[in-house]
Amino acid sequence: MSLIMLIDDDSDMLELTKRWITKAGHEALCVTSGKEALDILKTSKPDLILLDAAMPEMDGPAVFEAIKADESMRDIPVVFRTGKDDEESEALLKALNPAGIVSKSEGRNALLTAVSKFSI
């Protein structure tokens, strides 16, 4: 069983994603802010991070950059989840070179397909 960290400020989306992940046979670690995630990552190393792109205080790109700047975390694959489906938003996320980007509007199958690419 793999451990997937879910980072999202939307509690409903977090709970829904947790259900999908656990039904697919993974363990989910739910976190509601980027700062909390970075604190937890100091002591826990998930196999994959699903990161909401738009959050208050510390958005997804800022969290991503902090993860990649830390030698102890930088090898953890990060997949952005975004509610913005416009080309400009996607281009900004792609420029960061994440392991993947999945639109929240694409739903369960797209998310689980993205997760399966990491053979975890």
Image (cartoon, rainbow, N blue to C red):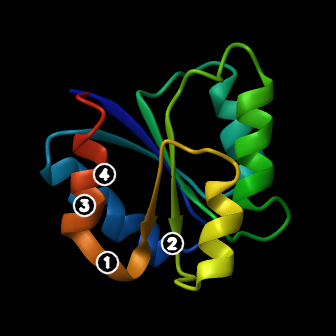
Marking on residue 114: 4
In space, the residues marked 4 and 1 are separated at their CA atoms by 11 Å
Relative horizontal placement of residue 98, taking residue 15 as reference (left or right): right
**Residue bearing the label numbered 3:** 19
**Residue bearing the label numbered 2:** 11
Mark nearer the viewer, 3 or 1: 1
Quarter where residue 97 is shown: top right
**Residue bearing the label numbered 1:** 106
Relative horizontal placement of residue 4, taking residue 21 as reference (left or right): right
In space, the residues marked 3 and 2 are separated at their CA atoms by 12 Å
**How many marks overall?**
4
* Residues at circles 3 and 1 in contact by the CB criterion of under 8 Å: no
Mark 4, secondary structure of its residue = helix
Quarter where residue 110 is shown: bottom left
Amino acid of disc 3: Arg
The crowd level at tag 1 (other Cα within 10 Å; few <14, some 14-19, many 20+) is few
